[in-house]
Amino acid sequence: MKPHSLLCALVVLSTTLFLREFSHSADSQPNIILMMGDDHGWEETGYNGHPYLKTPVLDEMAATGVRLEHFYSTHPSCSPTRAGFLTGRHPNRMGTFIPNMSFRPEEITIAHLAKQAGYQCGHFGKWHVGPVRKDSPVSPLAMGFDESLAHDNFFDLNPTFSRNGEAPEVFKGESSAILADETIRYIDKVHAEGKPFFVVLWFGSPHEPYQGLPEDLALYDALPAKYADRKVRLTSTETGLQVERPLGEVLRERYAEITAMDRAIGTLRTHLKDSGLRDNTIVFYCGDNGTSADGLLKSPHRGKKADHYEGGVRVPGVFEWPARVPEPTTVTLRASTSDILPTLADIMDVPVPNRLLDGIDLVPLLSKQVSQRPSPLFFWSFNLPALVKQNPEPYIDPELQKGTTPLLKLTPDGLATRNFKNFRLPLPITKVDYTGTRAVIDGDYKLIILRDKKVGKEIRELYNLEADPGETTDLAAKNPDLVKSLDQKMHSWQDSVLNSLTGADYSK
């Protein structure tokens, strides 16, 4: 083993042994802040080699904290990933199939667990797993949080938020900075009360439509001329409808939003340091899915948001905990947003929910220097159109699924807010319920199952991610036995997910 590799292994080992010891020390509970960007892809950070983006704060976190080199979103789109983030379960288990579908009131979130451990819990920013209004059965306050300043979906400059489910109000300013300030206010209040804080901070950036501050836009003034020939479709900030614009102009605005978000994270980290809280606070950041098509410039990975290729599900992931991770390290173990709940449950010393989880506790894996995940990572975009054809029964009263917080992007019928849906699975379960694009990563191999429109049937592609992270060479024809084995693992896992979707887990 090379000296550098040996050092990294020793750091990981000592760090996770501290985690194991610390997780059972009630007198020294860490504060926890979990942050997430909206449509922020893996390649869109300075530390991952982006040619233009300025992300000095995330770069510093990656250089001095823990860099999760192979980190994945639970799903290639936002609402499903957020449902998995909060519950440790795949979103299909709770009917959060696509954006603007809620999860279910019976789900147990990480905020519920944190409250068991004595934390005060706050949610700030994007919610998008149900309405934020007070009477919603899946609002932040209904799902374990003590306080919230939230939006049903995404937001831009001068955002509208609902505080604790009340009537929405406009907040003047740049949205990431507003959320950082609100988080600081909350953690100061909780700390003054002598309690640990647990905060979920979900930014609205860099989701389109894009709006940047002049000083941030100026950093990227060269891009419009450099990428003037290619056009992309996105939302107009003037009409709320789809328009076509030059890529360079769009990238300038998108990157300005990412830089502003990065600066807001820095404001929060600086406050933690000045308040004497940084050493014993876990600060985590990740994206919710890959880069959206309108903002995609260049990536070493194939695909984009909504795809099951690496470009759709591999996202930036970094965290800090200076008191227990004193040296920088890079973790190559494949990890997912669904792992957050079981891992933090270990650290907080509370039991995980008595139901099927898809995430795993990473603490013992790192303490044993495990480089390969012991169980597969599964991804699945449910065949929602086939379900809708069956006219399924709503799981939650549609009146309670209506959103209240406006956003710039209009729906096709002109609605400036977002309403949510969740359906009961009609029984009996049939073969069509197993369809939809899906993927499984087991070790270095990834099997993707998707429908080929040209041949009118499902096809299977196999990639070795270690040798071919760009997924350029399909190995399926040369490895039929491996394809069959991974296919069987996928089907068995789907059996479990569909059983959960019926509501069977809620009786446990």
Image (tube, rainbow, N blue to C red):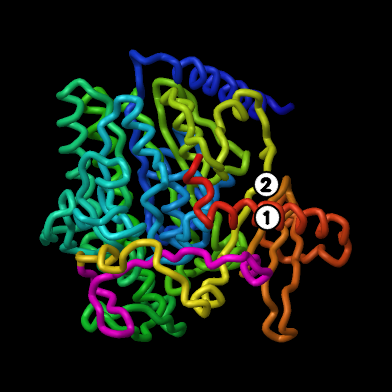
Residue pointed to by mark 1: 440
The CA span between labels 2 and 1 is: 6 Å
Query: Is residue 21 magenta-colored?
Result: no
Residue pointed to by mark 2: 376
Label 2 SS: loop
First-in-chain label (2 vs 1): 2
Q: Amino acid at mark 2?
A: Pro
Q: Quick check: 72 left or right of 452?
A: left
Q: Residue at x 57, y 65 (%)?
A: 427
Q: Main secondary structure of the magenta part?
A: loop
Image height of 201 relative to 300, above or below: above
Tally the numbered discs. Answer: 2
Image height of 95 relative to 180, above or below: below
Magenta extent:
406-435
Q: Quick check: 92 left or right of 309?
A: left
Q: Pick whichever, 205 or 186, lies toward us.
A: 186
- Residue 64: x, y in percent? 44, 32
Q: Amino acid at mark 1?
A: Val
- Residue 446: x, y in percent? 71, 56
Label 1 SS: strand
Location of residue 186 (image quadrant): top left
Q: Residue at x 27, y 41 (%)?
A: 145
Query: Is residue 426 magenta-colored?
Result: yes
Q: Pick whichever, 316 or 112, lies toward us.
A: 112
Q: Pick whichever, 24 or 12, lies toward us.
A: 24
